[in-house]
Image (cartoon, helix red, strand yellow):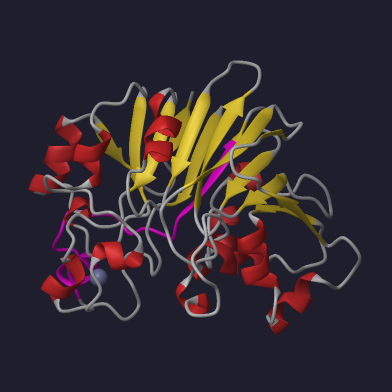
Amino acid sequence: MRIRVLGSAAGGGFPQWNCGCPNCRGLRAGTIRAKARRQESVAVSADGRSWLLLNASPEIREQIESFPGLHPQAPRHSPISGIVLTNGDLDHTLGLLSLRESYPLTVFATDRVRRGFTEENVFYRTLERFTDQVTWRPLKLGREEDLATGLTLEAVPVPGKPPIHLEGSFAPDAEDNVGVRIRETRSGTVLAYFSGVGGVSPAVAQALADATAVFFDGTFWSEDELPALGVGDKRARDMAHAPLGGPHGSLAALGTLSASRRILIHINNTNPLLREDSAERAHVTARGWEVAYDGMEVSL
Ligand SMILES: [Zn+2]
């Protein structure tokens, strides 16, 4: 299995257009050791010819261009065989609207996420220009589905919430937010991809336990990261992201994992992990965790 990181940042990217936090300022000024990052999206393939995209970020056009594996092989063609939406957040779904140039798409999402994107959304009409422009494939929790591309896909419920723009419209539901397990049928290799985790539930812990590689929510280091920097009043868990650090953080809750690669992704621009010489980076590195960066490739 080949995994290519197209974007490793949380919503807003790094730097974020309206952010003057120390990380974003330092990156622009070239005074910190850190790399710019696009918003989270990852491509996965068993054969190197057809690719499954995990999430469709607002930067999808540049992300496709950044990786030759996703370039067309014919006058009208795309190696993207499907797109998985792990929740309805705009940083995970907005890119779909940019893929409007009359080409059939297959999108895997829970019923809740599909409804949140398609209902009462006038812009969705751009993906209804011809019959079957988008084929929605329902993600049913706990059901492993053969994608016929050498991969299987299984969605796992993860503590989360509806996207901000649907808060109040939809009551919270177990299908709001999922992680996925992707298994290569030939080798049995399993990728566990959990980029938005509001808490390490027993289902999350079980889904990671036997994975060959784990991608995990690295959004925030601490619960009060945004208020402490004066860039917001929400705490990490208010945004359905368990912070990594501290005795009650997700790293402590995960304990030891058997995965040969353990990689943090969906990193918010305020997170001290982004600074390559920070104490927090040294802390996770010493525990066998890597920090995803754009262009990172993993072969399992
Ligand atoms: Zn910032």
Is 93 drawn above or below residue 213 in the view shown? below
| Viewer-nearest residue: 233 or 32 | 233
Q: Quadrant of the N terminus?
A: top right
Q: Residue at x 18, y 30 (%)?
A: 287
Q: Is residue 269 visible?
A: no
Q: In the rendered structure, does residue 25 fall within the stretch colored magenta?
A: yes
Left or right of 288 on screen, residue 1: right
Q: Residue at x 90, y 68 (%)?
A: 130
| Viewer-nearest residue: 25 or 147 | 147
| Viewer-nearest residue: 215 or 205 | 205
Q: Residue at x 45, y 55 (%)?
A: 40
Which x, y percent locates residue 201? Answer: 36, 43
Q: Is residue 147 visible?
A: yes
**Image mark count:** 0
| Viewer-nearest residue: 268 or 120 | 120
Which x, y percent locates residue 83? Answer: 65, 51
Q: Where, by quadrant of the figure, is residue 296 drawn? A: top left
Is 142 drawn above or below residue 83 in the view shown? above
Q: Where, by quadrant of the figure, is residue 234 drawn? A: bottom left
Magenta stretch: give its range. 21-44
Q: In the rendered structure, does residue 188 fall within the stretch colored magenta?
A: no
Q: Where, by quadrant of the figure, is residue 76 drawn? A: bottom right
Which x, y percent locates residue 95? Answer: 60, 65
Going by the picture, which residue comes out furthest to the right? Answer: 131
Which x, y percent locates residue 232? Answer: 23, 78
Q: Residue at x 42, y 58 (%)?
A: 160
* Picture quadrant of ligand 1: bottom left
Going by the picture, which residue comes out furthest to the top? Answer: 187
Left or right of 56 on screen, residue 235: left
Left or right of 96 on screen, residue 100: right
Is 265 drawn above or below residue 189 in the view shown? below
